[in-house]
Image (spheres, grey):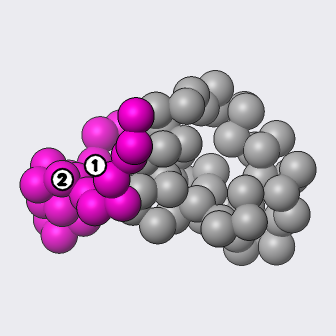
Amino acid sequence: MIMSNFIDETERHAELYDTFTPRQRLILKAVEDSRLNGSDKEEMYAKLNTVSINKVEVDWLKRTGRFLPSI
């Protein structure tokens, strides 16, 4: 299955109006903390593993441009 790089209307609404779910907020905080600390690929994965991130959530981060491109 080919995945689109475009976010859907629900994701766009969440972006515009900051209406993320509590789970999404937790994941976004983990990603932001890793970025602020200058984490490399392995450290980023370790931080995301602490919040038990799954493939769907990783795909969401990639699709919305929040995941580091090198990961």
Report whether 9 appears left or right of 18: left
Q: Say above or below: 56 vs 26.
A: above
Disc 1 and disc 2 in contact, CB within 8 angstroms: no
Which residues are drawn in magenta? 1-22
Q: Which mark is residue 8?
A: 2
Would residue 14 be visible to someone looking at this image? no
Residue drawn 28% across and 61% down?
6
For discs 1 and 2, the disc positioned in front in the rendered view? 2
Instruction: State the image coordinates of residue 21 (x, y, percent, origin top left).
Output: 29, 40
Which amino acid is tagged 1?
Phe
- How far apart marks 1 and 2 lie (CA) works out to 14 Å
Q: Residue at x 65, y 68 (%)?
A: 69
Q: Where is mark 1, residue-wise?
A: 20
- Expressed as whole percent of the image width and height from the top left, the position of residue 7 reads 26, 58
- Is residue 3 in the magenta section? yes
Residue 13 drawn in magenta: yes
Q: Which residue is located at x 40 percent, y 34 percent? A: 1
Q: Residues within 10 Å of mark 1 (few under 14, many from 20)?
A: some
Note whether residue 69 is visible. yes
Crowd tier of the residue under label 2, counting other residues whose Cα lies within 10 Å: few below 14, some 14–19, many 20 or above: few
Helix, strand or loop at label 1? It is loop
Q: Is residue 26 left or right of residue 23?
A: right
